[in-house]
Amino acid sequence: MSKKALIIYAGAGQGHYSCAKSIKRVFEDKYPEIETGLFDVLNHPFKIYQKAFAGGYEYLAGHIPFFWRLLYRFFNNSRRQKFAQLVFKLFFEKPLAALIGDFKPDFIIATHFLPARLISFSQRDDLIRIPSGAVLTDYGCHSFWLDPEINYYFVATPELKKCLMGYGVKDEQIMVFGIPIEKKFSPPNNQAEIVQKLGLKAGLFTFLIVGGQFKLSAVKALIDDLEKNQAGKIQYLIVAGRDGEFEKAAEQSNLKQMANVKTFGFIPNLEELMAASDIIFSKAGGLTVSECLATGLPLIINKVIPGQEEDNVEFLTGRGAAVKVNNVMEISQLINELLARPEKLAAMKNAALSLGKPKAAEDLVDFVYNKIK
């Protein structure tokens, strides 16, 4: 009988799903004899629970960020978590335990704190008895992930390992592999070919701007300001991603007529744009950050979701791989400085590259495989 691994995520934000997918893909490519399952813990028979959990997080983080920050900090204390744990257990434990019972995995991997907690509840209730591991998908330390029933923790940094050990987790339970990402995000060894493929000018400073931080009007103002002093020295790659409003505005703007500007919607080859770029203006989610670091691409960050993304930014800026800005003009000042001081840009790239862990997914899968083979 073939061995099985079950990967469970929560569909509240894209990052946890992307992490789970990257792990599954490595299993399929490297150990096809292992049957792997992928499951969204929020795929509940009663859809209202799914909407309440995912929608509640998105609303609080997007519209009442100060309250989300308060909750994030408040629940970083095991004594304050009991009511929330009771709610999660009441609504989500039985459907997940039933799925696990049907699939009969030899190892369970959770890429979100909710399934990690539910697995622990089921272990204590003797509904399951299966080795498990939790993948921490950010660079900050939060006690909500922790439970004595979880066998292993897969974390991004030695600092996170030290923090978990401070909560009583044993050294041998914590693996510093990095945050699992797709293997296509890695240091580019064919940058010249990618630059040519994308129709870019070799040797020109390339600024990658990913939508969601500012409205297009602010991006246009940024480009206009940079072009005053740096005309002919910068080329811009603007990616709307899943921001339909931003993409529509870009299509209708005069940016497409500028020779040094290329605009994109949602694209499957973002890693190529990253490989061709010198710096990226993007969000600070754990997966996004990890993809940039694995590529050796430093970040400029503005808007930050309170809590976990604040922790990510603190990690990045403290190690010289990112700069936090407050407005468009600060971005312009930074780019001007990087063009005037190429050694600073080189230092930021080296810092990003030193922090990157492009093989995180493979290392995690190898570990699990050796546990269940």
Image (cartoon, rainbow, N blue to C red):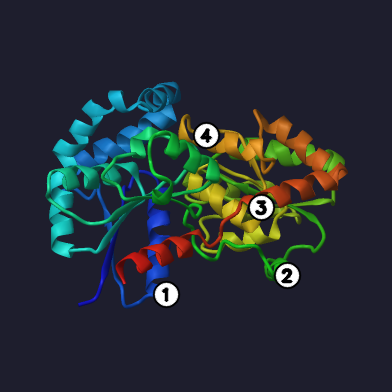
The crowd level at tag 1 (other Cα within 10 Å; few <14, some 14-19, many 20+) is few
**With 115 as the anchor, is 294 left or right in this view?**
right
N-terminal-most mark, 2 or 1: 1
Distance Cα–Cα, label 2 vs label 4: 37 Å
Q: Where 165 falls versus 96 (above or below)?
A: above
Task: Please name which of the two marks, 2 or 1, marks the residue nearer to the observer.
Answer: 1
User: Residue 155: image x %, image y %?
Assistant: 46, 48
Q: Identify the element where label 3 is drawn.
A: helix
Q: Return the residue at label 1.
A: 29
Split into 4 quadrants, where in the image is the C terminus?
Answer: bottom left
Residue at the image point whose x is 49% and y is 45% from the top: 286
Which circle's residue, 1 or 4, is located before the other in the chain?
1
Q: Nearer the viewer, mark 3 or mark 4?
A: 3
Residue 354 bears which disc, if any? Answer: 3
Label 1 – label 4 distance at C-alpha: 33 Å
Which residue is label 2 attached to? 196
Q: Which residue is mark 4?
A: 311
**Callout 4 amino acid:** Asp
Q: Which element carries disc 1, helix, strand or loop?
A: helix
Cα–Cα span, label 1 and label 3: 27 Å
Mark toward the start of the polypeptide (3 vs 2):
2
Q: What's the distance in space between the residues labelled 3 and 4, CA to CA?
A: 19 Å
Circle 1: residue type: Asp
Helix or strand or loop: what does disc 2 sit on?
A: helix
- Real-space CA distance between mark 2 and mark 1, rounded to the nearest whole angstrom: 30 Å
